[in-house]
Amino acid sequence: MLATAGTRDASAPMRERVSAEEWAARVELAALYRMVHHFGMTDLIANHITMRVPGEPDHILINAYGLMYDEVTASNLYKITLDGDVVLRPDVDLGLNITGYVIHGAIHQARPDLHVVIHTHSAAGTGVSGMKCGLLPVSQHAALIDGRIGYHDYEGAAFNLDERERFVASLGSGNLMILRNHGLIACGQSCAEAFIGIYRLEMACKMQVAALAGGIDNALMMPPEALENTRRILIDHPEIGAGTLQWRALLRRMERIDPSWKE
């Protein structure tokens, strides 16, 4: 289950071992881990969020396997290749979970436009992933998802590198994917875009679970014209999908709660 942890690096602080650009990326990614924890989208030590290292397209940052998301900091992130080889190891006695680079490495490799990938196992997200109907237009949050959501059938725990091509094919040209009987994927060009994607998808799943509590025949679907009008907003106002304002507000909240993610 665990990948080789690699050779321990020099004892200098992580901030002194990386470029200023990489350190800034580490701080931003650590904040994203804290946000996903804050909004209850975690599954103990499972799952991953990855970010491409600035200027190093074949390297990504990822969490050590064994830390809770609210323990992730800029310093304790691993830097690895897309195939899981350790480039820079943090000063922690923890390794890597292979599923991180099977799923995430595949997406980063195939989609150079995407720099951040989030994977979750939330109750609502996994619940909808187990529904034959998939995500339904029963809420405005669902309507704000641009319609290019992918679906990937469950093949077992993601340990098989051969599944990578099928992951990428299922994602297609979109940024969101539902892993059947498994969970959710959200990607973006930035932490802000990836977070607003997973947040809206998670909220849409929660609202769908609530709406279907009375049975699917009692659920009110959004009219096609209303759905199209809402999605048109994302085309006419791309800043809504970028999540920039929300990201700034969330950083302020994380700062108030516990600024240790920046260490």
Image (cartoon, grey):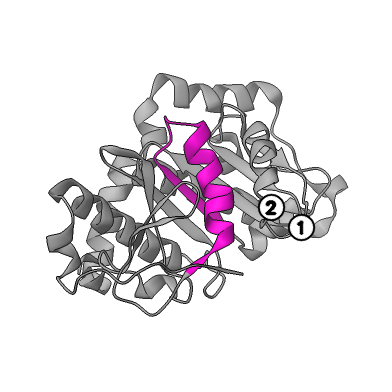
On screen, 4 above or below 202? below
Residue 255 position in % (x across, y down): 22, 66
- 216 relative position to 66: left or right: right
- In the image as oriented, which residue stretches furthest toward the front? 7
Quadrant where the C terminus lies?
bottom left
Residue 161 position in % (x across, y down): 65, 48
Q: Residue at x 75, y 41 (%)?
A: 220
Q: Nearer the viewer, residue 148 or 162?
A: 162
- 59 relative position to 127: left or right: left
Q: Quadrant of residue 241?
A: top left
Q: Which residue is mark 1?
A: 156
Q: Are marks 1 and 2 in contact (CB under 8 Å)?
A: yes
Q: Residues within 10 Å of mark 1 (few under 14, many from 20)?
A: few
Of the residues shown, which amino acid type is indicated by label 2?
Asn
Q: Nearer the viewer, residue 125 or 73?
A: 73
- In the image as oriented, which residue stretches furthest toward the bottom? 93
Q: Which residue is mark 2?
A: 160
For the residues labelled 1 and 2, the Cα–Cα distance comes to 9 Å
- 200 relative position to 137: left or right: left
Q: Which residues are magenta?
A: 96-119
Q: Closer to us: mark 1 or mark 2?
A: 2
Q: Nearer the viewer, residue 91 or 136?
A: 91
